[in-house]
Amino acid sequence: MSRIQVPAVEAATGATADLFARIKKSLGKVPNAYAAIGALQPAALNVMLEVDAVLTASSLSKKDIETIKLVISTTVDCDYCVAAHSLVGKMAGLSPETLRQLRQGELTGDAQRDALASFVRYLALTSGTIPSEQYAAIKAAGYTDQQLVEISLAISAIIFTNVFNRINDTDVDFPAVD
């Protein structure tokens, strides 16, 4: 059970109600993580939604964005985000096998996706400036300097939700991951 108790989504008022209506229109429901964040700090939820809009309009594909979010979530062991981004990754067109491989840290057979997953995983597991070889590998895979900014933004966004969900132990309201 989530540690932080929040009012029912239907009881939201003001800015929170507006955000929840926007989310419901887009997703059909307000996921538990968004409900908790929005109830406690609507401005933070709004920033999250704005970052997602920037990422959606970026030069990264939806598959790339979900690869990043799933790899980071798996690396930091956020069960909520792993479930969420396994589902959203499937909706973005990643196969169940590719999703499993990404969660397990295995190669997918797609050289560009594997380079992205390796780069993101390396960033999540290390500190300090990355070695020249890591930079060269992601560039050789075809990612541009602009996309490196977008990759950084996607990592930053998912780390926020990973951290909050780990603090809250947010009840997972997405299908179980196989």
Image (tube, rainbow, N blue to C red):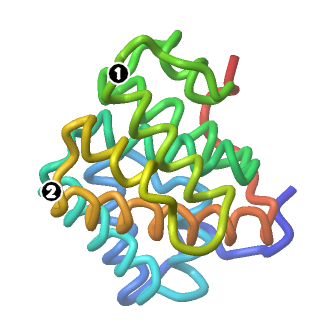
Q: Is residue 146 left or right of residue 158?
A: left
Depth check: give the residue in front, 120 or 1: 120
Q: In the image, what residue occupies the spot 35% across and 54% down?
A: 24
Q: Residue at x 69, y 16 (%)?
A: 178
Picture coordinates of residue 7 (x, y %)?
A: 66, 75
Q: Earlier in the sequence, mark 1 or mark 2?
A: 2
Local secondary structure at mark 2: loop
According to the picture, the residue beneath numbered tag 2 turns out to be 58
Q: What kind of element bears circle 1?
A: helix
Residue for badge 1: 111
Quarter of the picture holding the N terminus: bottom right
Indicate left or right for 101 with 156 as reference: right
- Quarter of the image for residue 166 reads bottom right
Total numbered labels placed on residues in the image? 2
Residue 40 rendering spot, x and y as whole percentages = 60, 86
Question: Which amino acid lies under the numbered mark 1 shown in the image of this protein?
Answer: Ala
Seen from the viewer's position, the closer of residues 118 and 62 is 118
Q: Are marks 1 and 2 in contact (CB under 8 Å)?
A: no
What distance separates the C-alpha of mark 1 from that of mark 2? 21 Å
| Residue lying at 52% horizontally and 10% vertically, measured from the top left | 97
Residue pictured at 37% horizontal, 54% vertical: 135
Using the image, tell me which numbered label, if any, was put on residue 28: none
Residue at the farthest front position? 132
Q: Indicate which label's residue lies in the foreground, 1 or 2.
A: 1
How crowded pointer 2 is (Cα within 10 Å; few <14, some 14-19, many 20+) is rated as some
Q: Is residue 29 above or below residue 39?
A: above
Q: Position of residue 66 (x, y in %)?
A: 40, 40
Relative to 104, say whether 61 is above or below. below
Q: Residues within 10 Å of mark 1 (few under 14, many from 20)?
A: few
Q: Amino acid at mark 2?
A: Ser
Q: Viewer-proximal residue, 13 or 79? A: 79
